Structure formats: C-alpha cells, structure tokens
Image (spheres, grey):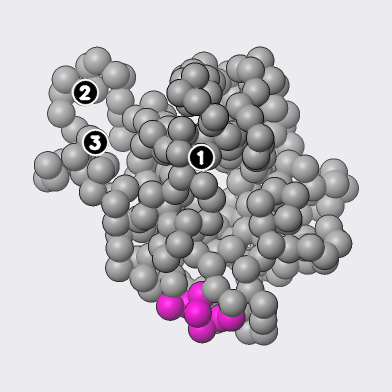
Amino acid sequence: MRPWLRDNLVLSLKEFKLGRFVLKAPAVCGAVEGRDVREMGRAVSLALKKGADLVELRMDSLENRENWQRILKDGLPLIVTHRPKREGGAFSGSEKQRLAIILEAIESQVPCVDIEFSTPRALRDEAVAAAKREGVSVLISWHDFSTTPGIGVLNKMAREMARAGGDLIKVVTTARDPSDSIRVLDFLVNIQDKIPVPVVTFAMGEAGRITRIASLMLGSPFTYASVRRPTAPGQFDVAEIKLLLQKLMPREGEG
C-alpha cells in the first residue's frame, strides 16, 4: 500500500474470518451460478483461475441439487447462499424448504452461510444457532432493489442485523444517481464504530458501480464480482476488479 493513500484516506489492510479461514481484506468474492453440480463446479474453478479470494455458491440457481456437496473442497473459503425471489434470487418455494438447504450446508460445515434478514425470525434463529454450534460463520444480508434509504434507516438496519447473530453483515442498496452512491459510502464510514462486526456494503446499478471498489477503500472486507455473467446489476468481473485493486490498493510486492 502506498503511504500517501494510507495517510490521506485512513486505509488499512485487515483480516476477517470466514469459518476456519482467516482472509486478508480487501478481498474479492466470485459469485458462482450453475444449473447442475458439474456446471457449478466448473464455475468455481473459473472463479479461482480469475483470482477470486473466496467464492459464493448461489444454490438458488441449481435446477438439480443432487450431490451438491461434491462442490465443497478443503481449503476453499465458501459462502453458501440460497436466495429467494423477493431478494433477487431464483428460489420460489417455501421458506422452510429454502432454509433446509442452508441447514444442510451448515451440517456439511461450510465456512459461511448467507441468511437473509427478511427470513422469518424463528427459521432465521434456528439457522444462526445451528451455525454457531458448527463453527460456521453467518453473513446476515439485506437488499433494497429500488432505492438507497437515508443513513438513519441504514444504521438502524445494520444494528438489528448485527444483533440477529451476524458474524458479518451485508447491506446492499440501489443507486439511481451519484448521491445514492455517496450516501451508502457515508453509511459505511459512520457505522463501523457503532457495531462490532464487519460490514459489506455497496449500491447496485450502474450509478452505484463505483461503490463496489470505493467501499473496499473505506473498510468493507470484500466485494462480489461476476465469474461468467453478473448475478446483480453493476457487478465487475472477478479479473477486472482484481486488476483495479492491484492498481488502487496494491499489497506489499504489488504495483
């Protein structure tokens, strides 16, 4: 890291935990989809080839989940996500059915599971408790696909998510113009000393694309990037964002 960046923007490279893994921040998470286990496995390999530091398995994209645990590999930091349609995913079944996959992932001792804050509380609490017993990290997530709320609303949401048992929280909004991007970054700067867990945050959409990089410079531990095709509006490709990070936030021996 160049000293002037650290001095002027108070940047620092930290570490964060994902289950048994300790990862250096800022990191890039490759968001992986696939219709079947073989296709998803190939996508995981491609994400790693492009330089992803960790991988998100979008279980809601699987049409055939038989033997999905074959994708799991020792030494690979993974986040298992089973996203419902209301939060931009593909799963349309019941919440109990959806959480069953998350519980399977926890039983398989994956490093991390993503549990939406909007999940019915009883089911959410059950999954969080199971994760704690197995040493699995919990990422509590929340998405706004229409706007970027005010900082007061975002702060309140972040506090509630942290209290819900998140080891990390993910707050994602939608930017319609540059002021929305500024607001979500302002939220990130202000919330970090108010809750005890790392905050992954950025704004979706083309107007919010810059926040996927800028948030890393302001303390977000990682960001999401596409492997084959975007899983959310405004995503960079893994290789593209890794190159940008090397230029903007070079680690020792880089740049």
Are the residues flagged by discs 2 and 3 in contact, CB closer than 8 Å?
yes
Compared to residue 41, the image places residue 175 above or below, namely above
Q: Which residue is mark 3?
A: 249
**For this rendering, which residue is in front, 242 or 165?**
242
Compared to residue 55, the image places residue 219 above or below, namely above
Q: Residue 105 location, x and y as percent?
A: 65, 66
* Amino acid residing under circle 1: Gly
First in sequence: mark 2 vs mark 1 = 2
Q: Quadrant of residue 245?
A: top left
Q: Which residue is mark 1?
A: 205
**Magenta stretch bounds:** 36-42
Is the magenta region chiefly helix, strand or loop?
helix
Q: Residue 204 location, x and y as percent?
A: 52, 39
* Amino acid residing under circle 2: Leu
Q: Which residue is mark 2?
A: 5
First in sequence: mark 2 vs mark 3 = 2
